[in-house]
Amino acid sequence: LKIFEDGVRYEVDFAKSHKTGFFCDQRENRSRFAALANGKRILDVCSYTGGFGISAAVAGAEDVLAIDLDENAIAQGKRNANLNGTQVSKKVRFVHTDAFSYLRTLGRNRHQFDLVVVDPPKFVPNRRSWDEGMARYHDLNKLAIPLVAPGGMLVSCSCSGLVAAIDLQEI
């Protein structure tokens, strides 16, 4: 199924995707993020099918690096970028990789981005996984923060229902 969101085209595959195939609850966040993206360098961590990165590219981002561990999501993200034309697909580079190790490499190489979004999968699916999951949120954000250029912005998300907004803020 092909959908439009704020003038951006996406392909949704209900059979092979996570949950609904597209995280509709992030619609307003993608829109607000894209509104800040014109002329900016973007890092989309745990990009899934490229929602944040592609919306930023459509809104005029200079360059987008989208990383995810899921090969199928990366393939669909590339298709999504292509759905939005050559200008967009040229700006968005998808990398199939583990976010933790790749962010370490970006940090060692002193890369920085104007806008960084970290939107990982559910790290705390149940109460037994609280400590490990919270440590993963902490580590991912700790690796992402130095990649934010001076004057830039970090957007950190959690889809773990057990993690309250204040818990994520604390991390």
Image (spheres, rainbow, N blue to C red):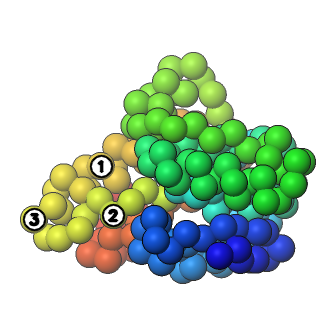
Mark 3 / mark 2, whichever is N-terminal: 2
Residue under numbered circle 1: 136
Inspect the image, locate mark 1, and give the three-letter code of the amino acid beneath it.
Answer: Arg
Which residue lies at the image location 51% right of the left edge and 38% below the top edge? 96
Separation (CA) of disc 1 from disc 2? 10 Å
Return the x and y of residue 32 as percentages of the image width and height: 71, 71
Q: Is residue 37 visible?
A: no
Instruction: Specify the label residue 128 is tagged with.
Output: 3
Return the x and y of residue 50 as percentages of the image width and height: 63, 56
Residue under numbered circle 2: 122
Which residue lies at the image location 79% right of the left edge and 60% below the top edge? 83
Helix, strand or loop status at disc 3: helix
13 or 125: nearer the viewer: 13
Helix, strand or loop status at disc 1: helix
Mark 1 / mark 2, whichever is N-terminal: 2
Mark 1 / mark 3, whichever is N-terminal: 3
Separation (CA) of disc 1 from disc 3? 14 Å
Check contact, mark 1 vs mark 2: CB within 8 A. Answer: no
User: How crowded is the residue under tag 1: few (<14 C-alpha within 10 Å), some, or many (20+)?
Assistant: some
Which residue lies at the image location 54% right of the left edge and 80% below the top edge? 25
Picture quarter containing residue 110? top right
Is residue 72 found left or right of 128 in the rendered image?
A: right
Return the x and y of residue 99 as percentages of the image width and height: 44, 40
Check contact, mark 1 vs mark 3: CB within 8 A. Answer: no
Quadrant of the frame with the C terminus: bottom left
Inspect the image, locate mark 2, and give the three-letter code of the amino acid beneath it.
Answer: Lys
